[in-house]
Amino acid sequence: MSFHLFRKLFDRWELWRSFHSIRVLAAWSVLFFSTILFPFLALQAEDNPSQKIFEELVVDSDQKKIDRAKVKYILGKSGERYDLEYKEKDKDTEKEKSNQEILQDFLRRYFLARMTKVSNLNQLPQMREEVREKAADSKGKSDVMDAFNQITSGMMHAMCNGVLDATTPNGTQKVIVIQESVRDSNNKLRVVRIKDDLKRGKDKVFSLAGDLIKHAEISGLAPSKTDFHPAVKLNAMLVLRDLNDKQPQKNKPKTASPRTSTQLDLVAYLESIDGLSDILLVGALSGIERHVDFEQDPSRRDRIAKVVTAVIDLPKGTGRSDDAVGWIRRQAVDILGKLRLPGEGDAYVEKLDEIIINTMEPLPLRIAAAEALRKMDLSRLPDGTIEKLTQSLTQLASDACDYEIVEQLRQNRPFSKPRLQHRLAAVRLTVTGDLQGQATDGGQMAGGLMAVATDEDQAALQKLLTEIQKIETRLNTLAATTPSNQVEDLLQESVRGLKGLQVTEDTPQPTAPQTAENP
């Protein structure tokens, strides 16, 4: 994609604002969102004629006045009058409405429906904050908070599922389906795409204007050719991510308890990645990443680890863009590291090692795998594993330098000193941990592989560490005015030093150095 088109898309939709407040993502993640994901979202509308028109829910602005008059008190005030079951006559319809119905109509017809408007894309972060504030108002009333979560969750899943065409006696209508749960009795994903998918008493069908359509009136149901904007779907996943069973104390986000039911929903999505769009897959991973930061239950952590590992194996050539696959796999690698679980038989450590050593993998993904490895519990690795990891990390450091040699020879893509420094630091910290190679009082290296290595393995790791430190010292001598031939000589010397550490006869010869990578 050209820079001109990139700017055109940004100026047209200002999509970067929609995700400015994603707090759980690292800096590189935000950069990737702004340089890869947003153009991807926009290009779906730019290049696909069927996606030029996006569907929107009708927003009932009259519901806005209900907020201050009733919703505020239903959410936060105690007393029988503010219980969910309490009913009073609605002055407009002359019918009795319970507080449950008032809350539901406000959220479904106005508060959450606004998120589907294309004109509101640049306000999505603010709207997500408003959802968090509304949820926080209910923290003293568990039944109301549960109702708020259930209504919000149902709407967000409906947005993710998208617009359907319902055949009725009045013709074809565009509808959404609000499910009681997106999981079946086995906790597997249950999506509604055709009429046979509908569950009586559990799924409600609404027109885009918000009117209920009875199941008996529907003779056919199918995905519509027009749908919500991709940013609307991603935003819906981010709203799901933020739902809590326990609301945080003011200015103390770590005191929250993320919603367990939502975690099970997100895992169910990730277990069905073949039928999941790139947008929903990215959103589900973002949600799971937040849950990993809080989750302590071993069985749930293990289930997340298994599903995330399957995402790491996501192949190319399945209709997904290479950029999307690269981003998704990198997210999954980072989450696996945060879980800190080595896996049964150290399966997750092995998975990361496979990525680190594989010269056919994108270099950023291999670096991310090294960073994830550093976070894991490495205290019970089988014999021979650290030796294997040492060779893999040595190969990674060598390839990082090799990559810069190739870049130095390419037009308009010069050698990047900060990039190489970051990559070497990632390898170094995997060896030393966060103490950067400093020894404890007893002389034992603390953190990283060095902390759990035998004396023999420590000696090999120390050689790698020493070589990396030499390269880092040389890099510090480079300036912007250093001639390119001197830069190349330094890099070549660095590669020779690292390759000299790979001296065993059984060591496979590396493939040709990488010449390209995902941004």
Image (cartoon, rainbow, N blue to C red):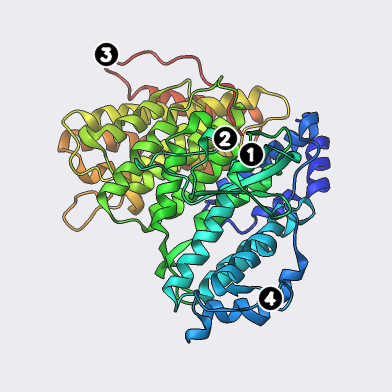
Please report the residue visible at 24 percent of the width from the left and 48 percent of the height from the top: 445
Q: Nearer the viewer, mark 1 or mark 4?
A: 1
Query: Residue 292 location in percent, x, y?
Result: 39, 52
Q: Earlier in the sequence, mark 1 or mark 3?
A: 1
Helix, strand or loop at label 3? It is: loop
Q: Nearer the viewer, residue 492 or 79?
A: 79
Separation of marks 4 and 3 at Cα, in angstroms: 74 Å
Mark 3 Cα-neighbour bin, 10 Å: few <14, some 14–19, many ≥20: few
Which label number is shown at residue 506?
A: 3
Question: Which residue position holds label 2?
Answer: 195
Please report the residue visible at 73 percent of the width from the left and 41 percent of the height from the top: 173
Q: Amino acid at mark 1?
A: Ile
Q: Quadrant of the N terminus?
A: top right
Question: Which residue position holds label 4?
Answer: 66
Separation of marks 1 and 4 at Cα, in angstroms: 32 Å
Mark 2 Cα-neighbour bin, 10 Å: few <14, some 14–19, many ≥20: some
Helix, strand or loop at label 2? It is: helix
Picture quarter containing residue 430?
Answer: top left
Helix, strand or loop at label 1? It is: loop
Separation of marks 2 and 4 at Cα, in angstroms: 34 Å
Which label number is shown at residue 218?
A: 1
Q: Amino acid at mark 4?
A: Ile
Is residue 42 something that shows in the picture?
yes
Separation of marks 2 and 1 at Cα, in angstroms: 8 Å
Picture quarter containing residue 104?
Answer: bottom right
Please report the residue visible at 55 percent of the width from the left and 21 percent of the height from the top: 318
Q: Quadrant of the C terminus?
A: top right
Does the CB distance between marks 1 and 3 fall below 8 Å? no
Q: Nearer the viewer, mark 2 or mark 1?
A: 1
Q: Nearer the viewer, residue 134 or 413?
A: 134
